[in-house]
Amino acid sequence: MAIFELYRRSTIAMCLIESLDQMVSSGVLNPELAICVLLQFDKSMTEALENKVKSKVSIKGHLHTYRNCDDVWTFIVQNAQIKTEEGQETAEFVRIVACDSKLLNQ
């Protein structure tokens, strides 16, 4: 699995992909340009996470499931309490996907 697949499963990426597909299907955009847009999205997400995100989050709960595949860790936390600088939230399930940032530069 490519590291960028992590971003492409996000809500914003899914909407972008759907919009690009519609534009390609209707002939407004050629497929090569759509791929370039998607690759630029991957690059922008990587840069934003590396340079702009400085918040810290604390998550407590029951570790329901964990796995490591291709150096990408996935944790599913049940009854999670999420604490940030702005406050606290709770969620029935939280999925955390993590990888070594060195892999992003490959």
Image (cartoon, grey):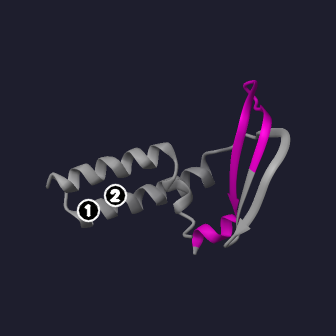
How many numbered circles are shown? Answer: 2
Please say if 71 is above or below 88: below
At which x and y percent is residue 100? 70, 65
Quadrant in the rendering for residue 82? top right
Q: Nearer the viewer, residue 32 or 43?
A: 32
Q: Secondary structure at mark 1?
A: helix
Residue 8 horizontal side relative to residue 92, left or right: left
Q: Which residue is labeled 1 in the image? A: 33
Decide: marks 1, 2 in contact (CB < 8 A)? yes
Q: Nearer the viewer, residue 61 or 58?
A: 61
- Residue displayed at 26% across by 62% down: 33
* In the image, residue 12 lies in the stretch drawn in magenta: no
Going by the numbered disc 2, the residue's amino acid type is: Val
The part of the chain drawn in magenta is: 76-105
Please say if 99 is above or below 12: below
Please say if 90 is above or below 2: above
Q: Quadrant of the C terminus?
A: bottom right
Which numbered marker is on residue 106? none
- Residue displayed at 46% across by 43% down: 12
Q: Which residue is labeled 2 in the image? A: 37
- Residue displayed at 71% across by 41% down: 94
* Residue farthest along the left direction in this orientation: 27
Estimate the spatial distance between the alpha carbons at disc 1 and disc 2, rounded to whole Å. 6 Å
Going by the numbered disc 1, the residue's amino acid type is: Leu
* In the image, residue 98 lies in the stretch drawn in magenta: yes
